[in-house]
C-alpha cells in the first residue's frame, strides 16, 4: 500500500503518471504556495518554481508553509515551497528560481502544465503567450477584493484553463488593452492589494483539480477550456457564461506561426536529459546519532 492509495480512483498508473509529471508554478505567494503544497500531497514529482520575492511579515496571513522564523531569516518564497514539497516528496525534482520567471524559460518550457499565480495582467499575458508558444496548458488563478458600498467588500476570483488552440485570456475578455493600460498607469500603486488565505485556497484547489483532470486517466475527456468565477461572499464557483459562448471558438490571438521556440537550432541540441538537482541529505535525529555512537562503542 502506498501513501497515495486513497487516490487510486484517479486511474491505473496514476501514481507513476503524477510522479513523472513536472509542473511550473509561477508566483509562490498566497495562491502558488497552496498549489505547491497540494501538488506535493498528490505525488507530483517535478517542479519549476519561480518567484523573485522574499517572505515578509505581511505575507504570513496567507503564504502556506511560511513561518515567522522564515521572515526573520529573509527566506525566498521558492525556498519555502521547496521545503514544503520535500516534506512529502523527498526525491522530487525541483528547480527553484528566486528570480523573475523570464530567467527560467528553459526549464519552464519542459513542464507538462504551468500554473500562473501572479498579480498583474501584463505578466499573465506574457506567461500565457509563453505557454502557448511551447504548447503547454496554462492555468491562471487570481483573486481580488472590490468595494461594493459602504464598508462592504466582494471577494472574487477566477480560474481559467487556457489550452493551445482554444480560447485564451483575451478571448475570455479577462485581459483587455484597457485593463493593461489601466494597470500600466497605476503601476507600483497596487502593492498592498487585499488577499486572504481561504479564497486563495479555494482557487488553488480548483486549479489542482483541473491539473489532475489533465494529467491522470481520471477524466476520459479532459476539459480544453475552463473559465470559472469565484464569489467568495456567496461561497460559489460558477461557470462563466463565456464557457458556453466560446465552446467552438478558435482563438485569433495566438496564431499557429507563433508556435515553437524562435531560437531553436537543431545543431545545438544534445538531447541529453538534464540531471535533476539532488535531494538534500536528511538530518539524523540526535537520538539516532547517540544510539549509533553507543553501538560503535560496544
Ligand atoms: Zn484568444
Image: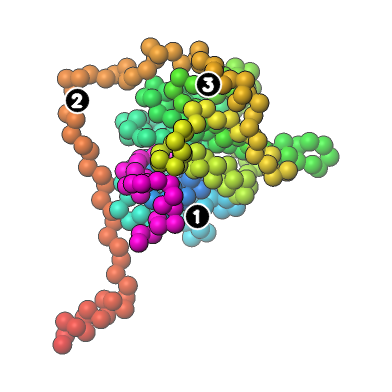
Mark 1, Cα crowd under 10 Å, few <14 / some 14-19 / many 20+, is many
- Mark 2 or mark 3, which is nearer the start of the sequence? 3
Point out the tag, 1 or 3, that comes first from the N-terminus. Answer: 1
Establish whether ligand 1 lies closer than 8 Å to the Cβ of label 2. Answer: no
**Is 101 or 116 nearer to us in this picture?**
116
- Circle 3 residues within 10 Å: few <14, some 14–19, many ≥20: many
Report the mark closest to the observer, 2 or 1. Answer: 2
Q: Residue at x 18, y 34 (%)?
A: 272
- Residue 159 drawn at (x, y percent): 57, 35
Q: Is the CB of the residue bearing disc 3 within 8 angstroms of ligand 1?
A: yes
Determine whether the residue tagged by mark 2 lies in a helix, strand or loop.
loop
Indicate which label's residue lies in the foreground, 3 or 2. 3
Location of mark 2 (residue): 269
Quarter-wise, where is residue 182 in the image? top right
Give the residue pinned by disc 3.
Answer: 167
Label disc, if present, on residue 277 of the rendered structure: none
Q: Residue at x 46, y 26 (%)?
A: 163
The residue labelled by disc 1 is 66
Residue 241 included in the magenta stretch of the image: no
Q: Which residues are magenta?
A: 1-27
The quarter in which the C terminus is drawn is: bottom left
Residue 51 rendering spot, x and y as whole percentages? 44, 40
Locate the N terminus and report the quarter of the image it occupies. bottom left
Where disc 1 sits, the SS reads: loop
Q: Classify residue 264 by image quadrant.
A: top left
Residue 6 visible? The answer is: yes
Who's the residue at 33% across and 19% down the image? Answer: 260
Counting from the top left corner in percent of width and height, residue 109 is at 34, 30
Q: How far apart are labels 3 and 2 at the CA level?
A: 32 Å
- Of residue 271 and residue 103, the one placed in the foreground of this image is 271
Total numbered circles: 3
Amino acid at each position: 500500500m502506498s501513501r497515495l492509495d486513497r487516490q487510486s480512483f484517479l486511474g491505473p498508473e496514476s501514481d507513476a503518471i503524477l510522479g513523472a509529471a513536472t509542473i511550473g508554478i509561477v508566483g509562490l505567494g498566497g495562491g502558488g504556495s497552496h498549489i505547491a503544497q497540494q501538488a506535493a500531497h498528490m505525488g507530483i514529482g517535478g517542479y519549476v518554481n519561480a518567484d523573485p520575492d522574499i517572505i515578509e511579515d505581511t505575507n504570513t496571513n496567507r503564504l502556506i508553509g511560511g513561518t515567522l522564523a522564515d521572515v526573520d531569516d529573509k527566506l525566498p518564497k521558492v525556498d519555502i515551497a521547496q521545503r514544503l514539497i520535500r516534506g512529502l516528496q523527498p526525491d522530487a525534482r525541483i528547480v527553484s528560481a528566486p528570480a523573475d520567471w523570464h530567467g527560467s524559460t528553459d526549464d519552464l518550457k519542459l513542464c507538462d502544465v504551468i500554473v500562473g499565480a501572479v498579480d498583474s495582467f501584463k505578466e499573465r499575458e506574457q506567461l500565457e503567450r509563453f505557454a502557448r508558444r511551447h504548447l503547454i496548458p496554462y492555468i491562471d488563478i487570481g483573486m481580488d477584493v472590490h468595494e461594493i458600498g459602504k464598508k462592504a467588500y466582494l471577494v472574487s476570483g477566477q480560474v481559467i484553463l487556457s489550452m493551445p488552440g482554444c480560447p485564451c485570456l483575451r478571448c475570455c475578455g479577462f485581459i483587455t488593452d484597457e485593463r493593461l493600460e489601466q494597470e500600466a498607469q497605476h503601476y507600483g500603486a497596487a502593492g498592498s492589494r487585499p488577499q486572504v488565505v481561504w479564497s486563495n485556497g479555494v482557487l488553488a484547489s480548483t486549479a489542482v483539480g483541473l491539473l489532475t483532470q489533465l494529467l491522470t486517466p481520471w477524466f476520459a475527456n479532459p476539459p480544453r477550456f475552463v473559465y470559472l468565477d469565484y464569489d467568495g461572499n456567496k461561497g460559489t464557483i460558477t461557470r462563466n457564461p463565456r464557457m458556453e459562448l466560446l465552446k467552438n471558438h478558435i482563438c485569433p490571438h495566438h496564431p499557429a506561426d507563433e508556435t515553437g521556440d524562435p531560437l531553436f537550432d537543431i545543431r545545438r541540441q544534445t538531447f541529453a536529459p538534464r540531471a535533476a538537482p539532488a535531494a538534500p541529505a536528511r538530518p539524523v535525529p540526535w537520538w539516532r546519532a547517540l544510539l549509533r555512537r553507543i553501538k560503535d562503542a560496544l
